[in-house]
Amino acid sequence: MADSDTCKDENNKTEDEIVPAPAAFKSDVWKHFGFAVSKNAKGEKVVDRQWTMCKHCHSKLRYNTGNTSNMQSHLTTHHPEKFADSLTKKVLSVDGKGFKRLVAKLEPKYQMPSWAHFSQTVFPALYRETKERVMLNLKQSECIAITTDGWTSRATHSYITITAHVLTSEWEMQSYVLQTRQLSESHTGVNIAEVLKSAVKEWGLDKIGTRIAVVTDNASNMRVAVKEAELSPHIRCFAHTLNLASQAGLKVNAVSRLLGRVRRVASFFHRSSTATAVLTTKQKLLNLPVHKLIIDVVTRWNSSLDMVERYLEQQQAVAAALLSDELRHKSREIDTLDASDIANAEDLVKILLPIKKATTVLCDELQPTISLISPLKQMIQDSMATDNHDSNAIALMKVAILKDLTDRYQGEDEKFMQESSAFDPCFRTLQHLGSGEREDVFERKASQMQQQDQDVLPRSPHPADLDDSSASFVPPLKKHALEDLLGSSFSSNQVTGGIQAEIDSYCKEALVSLSACPLKWWRDNAGRYPILSSLAKTYHTRYLGAQ
């Protein structure tokens, strides 16, 4: 190289001015190099981009645009201690040159394993070990339920994930994500069924005489898939059901028009900084909270509820702002709400609030079981009863929500939900049902107990086998919203006439708080109800929501 690349002695350093490299230059070497500044014939300072200068020794190196290898070589040879930080930052993977160089410095005799060694040997061995352990736990479980859902990655690749849920002998819920497989074929029910059947076989879930409950969303292809895979019972995600029912109510023409008018008002204040400033001033004058209006997302029904609630909170400030001199000429095209619209908006909030609280319950629960569905569903259905004072829009909205919700749980599905609630000590009195329905549930329960007594020996542990320190169980579920929704229905210890001794004793138990953990209760009382607890475990394994 014609140009010197040798460090100058400390005492002979030049005082050349160095200009830092532009911020767009991302290489670490630019922390140690810059461009030299020289003077032209007129004595003016000029930055020479053809030469770089070392900040440590002021050596000049020729610079070819985009090539930093000669600068890296200079730093490695003459300033290795200065380049240490840049070296360690290049430790990106075991195959990286920087990492190999670092390890060679630390221990020259160490043979660095390749990435292929980890990907082809270490990780597969770890997967096989974990899979064997999970399969053993699944094999030892009395009851199994699975949840499954499809999703799309940012790269627009479609996948389907399957998760298994089991209850241990100590009534502790355990969940295992069995697989996430790419689904490149069409998302038909038949293709999804093949994935489900393959997973059941691969993980040894197809035990003789064991039913596998499946929780999915309400998509038609999922219904077909579960039927084709011959899995039962099929439980539809209740949170998704509430979303669909709410969407059905909001699609009523009169309600949709009302939301559109509120949305236009909110959009007006979001688009204009002047309108926002005027609204803030009016809020302060009226002693209202200084909150921005909310614009809903059409696919999220709860955002529509939030939008209407916020509008009602700020309606006085909104009206005052729109009538102000600053906004009056700009807001002529905005169709504000009259008294009847405000009344409908207030009723809309009252209708949707119970559904929002029910959704909150499902989100708050760490391990929601399907015993919640029947009482929550009945509570919502009761709140949708039409009233003579309802406007036409509100009446139609109630009918739409009620129809959509009722149609999704009928026949055997409805019976299964009721039976699940009967096995939850929090809802065992079934106060949300009529007396005839309650008697039917307990008769079915007695029939199941007789069958269980004939076919299966009780496998629940005796209380003597359980000490206070045994097994960590699921912490109590938080049901503050649930108590708010259903507390009045389950506040008295009413006992339903029993058919069998265990059922009679179970019904006479002290009332359990809605904030109690049903799994903990059954763990502590399984020895007293050997047959009933075995059935309860079957129902409590069923998860409430899809993934």
Image (cartoon, rainbow, N blue to C red):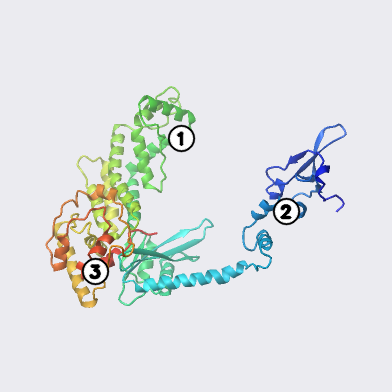
User: What residue is shown with label 3?
Assistant: 464
Q: Are marks 1 and 3 in contact (CB under 8 Å)?
A: no
Taking the spot 69% from the left edge, 49% from the top edge, the residue there is: 28
Location of residue 16 by image quarter: top right
Residue 23 percent coordinates (x, y): 68, 43
Q: Amino acid at mark 2?
A: Pro
Disc 2 to disc 1, C-alpha distance = 56 Å
Up-down: is 138 above or below 524?
A: below
Classify mark 1: helix, strand or loop. helix
Q: Answer whether residue 58 is visible to the viewer in this image.
A: yes
Classify mark 3: helix, strand or loop. helix
Residue located farthest toward the top when viewing the structure as drawn: 325
User: What residue is shown with label 1?
Assistant: 270
Q: Amino acid at mark 1?
A: His
* Residue in front for this viewpoint, 474 or 442: 474
User: What residue is shown with label 2?
Assistant: 80
Taking the spot 14% from the left edge, 55% from the top edge, the residue there is: 494
Q: Earlier in the sequence, mark 1 or mark 3?
A: 1
